[in-house]
Amino acid sequence: MAVGSPKVAVAVFVVKENKLLIGKRQACVAHSYFSVPSGHLEFGESFEECATREVNEETSLDIMNIEILKVTNNLFLDDEANLAEHYVVILVRAVLVDPNQIPQNLEPQKCDGWEWYDWENLPDPLVPQFRSAIKEGFNPFQDNFKEY
C-alpha cells in the first residue's frame, strides 16, 4: 500500500435555519456515505477561497460569512482497496448569499445529489470524520474552534 504526504481539504457546513446541505458521496473515499460539500485546498488558496470554490463547483451555490470551526486529522485505511490516505480537514461554516438559491448537482459522478437535512435528523451513514466530530461535541450551529 503506497503512502503519500498528508493532503489538506476544506469541508463546508452550509447552514440554513437549523438545516445542513448534505449529499451522498460517489467518490472513492467514503463511497455511499453522506457528507457536506468539500474538496482539496489548491496551491496558494485560502480556506475561505477553497470553501467558496468547492461549494460553487459542486452545487452552484454562492456562500458568504465563512468561519473556521474545527480542524481534524484523519487517516483513511482500506486494505481491500489498497488505500491509505492522510487528510487534514478544515471544517468551516457558511451561509447562502441568497437564501432562495436551490442546490444543483454539478458533479453527478461524485455525488447523488444535495438535500437540506435537519441537524436533529441527519442521514446515515455520515462520513466517519464527521460522525466522530459530532460524537466529540462538534456542532456547526455553535462556535467550536479551539486553539491549541
Image (cartoon, rainbow, N blue to C red):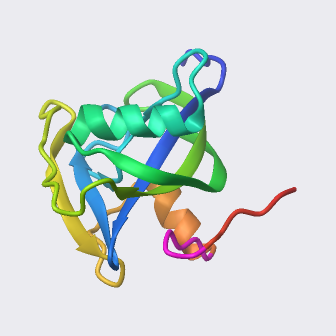
- State the residue lying farthest toward the right: 148
In the image, what residue occupies the spot 29% across and 53% down? 33
Q: How many marks?
A: 0
Identity of the residue drawn at 56% across and 23% down: 45
Choose between 112 and 77: the one closer to the eye: 112
From this viewpoint, is residue 111 visible? yes
Q: Position of residue 82 (x, y in %)?
A: 44, 24
| Residue 22 position within the rendered picture, expressed as x and y whole percent measured from the top left | 27, 58
Residue 26 in sight:
no
Instruction: Identify the residue at the far bottom of this view.
Output: 120
Residue ID at (87%, 56%): 148
* 113 with respect to 31 (left or right): left
Query: Horizontally, is 87 left or right of 108 in the view?
Result: right
Q: Which residues are magenta?
A: 137-142
Residue 20 found in image quarter:
bottom left
Q: Position of residue 107 (x, y in %)?
A: 17, 32
* Residue 115 covered by magenta stretch: no
Whether 108 is drawn above or below 100: the answer is above
Secondary structure, magenta segment, majority class: loop
Q: Residue at x 57, y 76 (%)?
A: 142
Q: Quadrant of the N terminus?
A: top right
Q: Is residue 139 magenta?
A: yes
In the rendered view, tell whether residue 56 sits above or below residue 119. Answer: above
Kindly indicate the quadrant of the structure image that contains residue 26: top left
Residue closest to the eye, 78 or 23: 23
